[in-house]
Image (tube, rainbow, N blue to C red):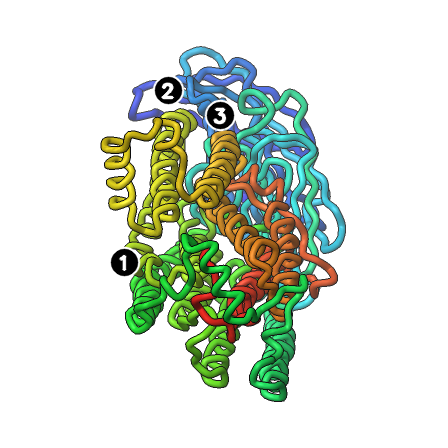
Amino acid sequence: MITANISFFMLITTSVFALTTGDLINVIVKEGIFSNRTDVTLNSTTRRLFVFTPQTPSSNPYNVHVWTNNSNMSKDHPVIVTVEQDPDVLEWSIPLTLESSNGKGFVLFNDTSRTLCNSKILSGEVNGTQNFTVSLSTFSPDNVNVSLKVVERTEFYLTKGKPHNISILAPGRPQYFLYKPDFIGDFGIEINIASSKNICFTAVVQKIKCPVYVSGQVLFEDGIRQTVVTKGTIRINSANFPDGFILIIAKENAENSCEEACPGVICENPPEVTIEIKNTIPENEYIFITLKVLGCIAGFSSVTILTCCFFSWWEKRQRPAYNIFNSTLFNGENHMDEETHRDTENSNNHDTTVASLCRSLERNKIKAHNYWVHVVNIAIFYGIPVVQLAAIYQGIVNKTGDEDSCYYNFGCANPGWFLSDFNHVQSNIGYITMGILFLVIVLYRRRVLPERETGIPVYYGTYYAMATALISEGILSACYHVCPTNTNFQFDVSFMYVMIILYLLKLYQNRHSDIAASAYSTFTVVGFIVFMAVIGIIVDEDQHRAFIVVPLVVVTYTTLCIYISLKIYYFDSVLTGLQQQWMRFRESYEPIQEILTPQKKGRFVITIIANLCNLAFLISGTLLYVNRTLDFGTFLLVLLMGNAVLYSIFYVVMKTLIHCEGISVQAVIYGVLGVALGVQSMILFLDKNTQMALSPAESRNYNQRCLQWFWNFYDKHDLWHFTSAGAIYFVFMFLLCLDDNIVLKERRHIPVF
């Protein structure tokens, strides 16, 4: 502590003995002069002490800045700079030693500076001044030249709505700024940081206190922090910082967290960094926005339910032989007389009908019910640890303040309550409500529509499973968005896999009831897909992607495609069909080309086309994955979605154009709406606002602002959640109503394709 009688110490030069070295150390005390550069010479026997006494109260008492420079650097014998002020001691060394960007060797910086913290202002004194000393010392036996300059910084205070520029950004020269709120209230604060060059640095928000740690490990353990390349946004709640905050911009130790365009640790021409602060939506507004969303969903659900009721009412008004479900497009004819059917069967006696593949109705109902039971069990046992991990992730983020651990869209990540990104979690409510709505409509149809022995057999258990999977997708996607990373991305896509496979299964089940896959085999495939997704996450190096993951996926997927093709061609009896083909080859006297000619030419052509399409999906997806355009989870999702679209097109073409069955009006409406929303949702999904293949700092370059017309609360990814939920709902409704126009047609007259 500096005593009041400083002039007394200015009159003498003190000599002391250093017990550690036994050498006489000359401590030279001088009065420090603000804004004046002082050059001194040091060695192991000489120490310099400068005493600074502000004469008049400063209008900006925080902004005392100490700059030092060492012209003849020595890593082994650095110069120790010690600043003492009541009640803190600040110390650093020059040259500053940092590990190089490539991890090979170290880089020395002889230009360092620090900003002092005035504790009197924190205690409530206005324009309080505080004395301090600056000590320079070294253990170098040779003379070391050091320059010292102490100045009062200008533009130290941040003002809301006014851009603040930093012209110097270099290792060893961290800077911090003070923000005081205009008024105390519960509102959000958004700190936008932009750099003119690709150079990685760290931004930290801390509560106002002394001392301010701007370097070392303490910097990365206190406050809310993130690394920045060209763009960064930190959103906080003013209630957590009632007295304001300190924003630190530091260059050191950032190279280990992100890549940068400038070679080495620092660019020759440092970039200009711009800081801007503005208010955002307060937390109490979140409830009103959520109620608006729920109101829109309630209105949508009401229209949908009324539409279903209208179609049911219209059906009851019609003659028993005709109802709204029998009205077709494409001029499809539903009823043929018995003679026509008999002639058709006689001329095509090798064709299989639905009647021949739905002989075990009760067993098939139990099988469909098993799908639902399996989905419920999987959702419970898979969802509980996911919720637990999401809570742990959020707790770690709240405790450490490390915003590099999660890939948020910080440009529109509205923190609320205990969540760092409330809007992206809350927007998953669309999946949950659409799943509940679909479940209600399925239950309604089961109650009002009679169970017939004509038409396509309806197994409601599969629809229950689809609705439950959609609800589970909303819950798990919300858990994923608590802290989105590449390692927990499977939380977001696992039930997407389930929904797509259930959709494919139900579409196939429509005309292949007896030979459709069981729940056990179906979810074994789903489990294997999730396992493959985990392998793709663990094996993340480029060479491993090319030589481990890709061959594994190609071989497995190709084998699966061949097996499914054989099941489709031989109507599930793969082993029997291959045995018959082998016996025909061994015992037949027909020419080899006739033996190899497929007996079911139509099915053979269809499977060949399907496999060629899958080959195209596989090649294009693999190239995008290897080039890091797609992550592995999305890669698998694209493969499954491609097959779902392909099979849907095949089913509709065969139903309407080949067999002239037509299609119900409801299915057309839902199909058009599903395709329209699906295309829109894909456009939104491809417009990425984060990139998990990059470092967190580089990913922030893709961050986007909230949509102004969407209450300035949601972004495009939130809109993707809502549109994709609507698209999935309409696709499910399309599948539910697809064959309603042939409910009165006898099953022995409904073809299998």
Q: Amino acid at mark 2?
A: Leu
Q: Nearer the viewer, mark 3 or mark 1?
A: 1
- Alpha carbon of mark 2 to alpha carbon of mark 1: how far? 85 Å
Task: Say whether disc 2 or disc 1 marks the residue closer to the N-terminus.
Answer: 2
Secondary structure of the residue carrying numbered label 1:
helix
What crowding class fits label 2: few (fewer than 14 Cα within 10 Å), some (14-19), or many (20 or more)? some
Describe residue 714's horizontal placement relative to residue 360 as left or right.
Answer: right
Q: Does 225 sit above or below residue 313?
A: above
Q: Nearer the viewer, mark 2 or mark 1?
A: 1
Give the image location of residue 138, x and y in percent: 43, 22
Viewer-side residue, 248 vs 313: 313
Q: Are marks 2 and 3 in contact (CB under 8 Å)?
A: no
Secondary structure of the residue carrying numbered label 3:
strand
Viewer-side residue, 17 vs 503: 503
Which residue is labeled 1 in the image? Answer: 520
Which mark, residue 497? none
Describe residue 299's horizontal placement relative to residue 252 as left or right.
Answer: right
At 31% from the left and 20% from the top, the residue drawn is: 21
Give the image location of residue 393, x and y in percent: 40, 55
Going by the picture, which residue comes out furthest to the bottom?
Answer: 317
At 48% from the left and 55% from the top, the residue drawn is: 347
Which of the 4 image quarters holds residue 295? Answer: bottom right
Which residue is labeled 2 in the image? Answer: 24
Q: Is residue 232 visible?
A: yes
Q: Is residue 294 visible?
A: no
Which of the 4 image quarters holds residue 671? Answer: bottom right
Q: Does 136 sit above or below residue 239?
A: above
Which residue is labeled 3 in the image? Answer: 96
Q: Nearer the viewer, mark 2 or mark 3?
A: 3
At 41% from the left and 61% from the top, the residue drawn is: 509
